[in-house]
Amino acid sequence: MPHVDFALMTAKTVGPQWNKATPEQKQRLQDEFRTLLLRTYSGALSQVKDQTVQVKPLRDISDESNVLVRSEIRGRGTPIQLDYRLEKSADTWKIWDVNVSGLWLVTTYQGQFKPVLSSGGVDGVIKMLVDLNKAAASRS
């Protein structure tokens, strides 16, 4: 997780409303979104066993601060596409988006956040994330 830029991921997922949010709202959004993503994806990743990751050659590195890394998880069954969008900040590359089998995480959550942002603003998204995290915690 130290290689994931949750602030950038959250900002890109929330979109233009991010710039209108207070520092407290931004922190709360980031914290709740991080919790949701960790709960959602850590369980799935913990089930991965006896598989290898094949990193594909980079196609275009014309932008020295952003890069797309394409890979496949190979093991039993059909290979799974797993790609990462990374951004360089200072001397560190960090992931800000992940694509699993054709579904980009940021785009997927943008679609879920958009109607809530339209009706309830940033506070509505925070409430939605809190509710999702509480529901997930009660099932654990």
Image (spheres, rainbow, N blue to C red):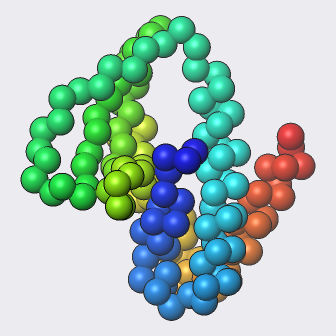
Can you say whether 33 is above or below 57 in the image? below
Can you say whether 31 is above or below 135 in the image? below
Residue 90 rendering spot, x and y as whole percentages? 35, 61
Q: Quadrant of residue 46?
A: top right
Residue at 54%, 8% in the rendered image: 50
Residue 84 rendering spot, x and y as whole percentages? 36, 43
In this rendering, the count of numbered labels is 0
Quarter of the figure with the C terminus: top right
- In the image, taking residue 106 as reference, residue 60 lies left or right, namely left
- In the image, taking residue 132 as reference, residue 84 lies left or right, namely left
Can you say whether 63 is above or below 117 in the image? above
Can you say whether 70 is above or below 86 in the image? above
- In the image, taking residue 22 as reference, residue 32 lies left or right, namely right
Q: Residue furthest front?
A: 91
Q: Is residue 104 visible?
A: no
Residue 24 rendering spot, x and y as whole percentages? 67, 83
Q: Is residue 66 visible?
A: yes
Residue at 58%, 14% in the rendered image: 49
Residue 123 rendering spot, x and y as whole percentages? 68, 83
Residue at 56%, 87% in the rendered image: 21
Quarter of the figure with the N terminus: top right
Q: Nearer the viewer, residue 111 or 30?
A: 30
Q: Residue furthest right?
A: 138
Q: Quadrant of residue 31?
A: bottom right
Q: Quadrant of residue 121?
A: bottom right
Residue at 17%, 36% in the rendered image: 58
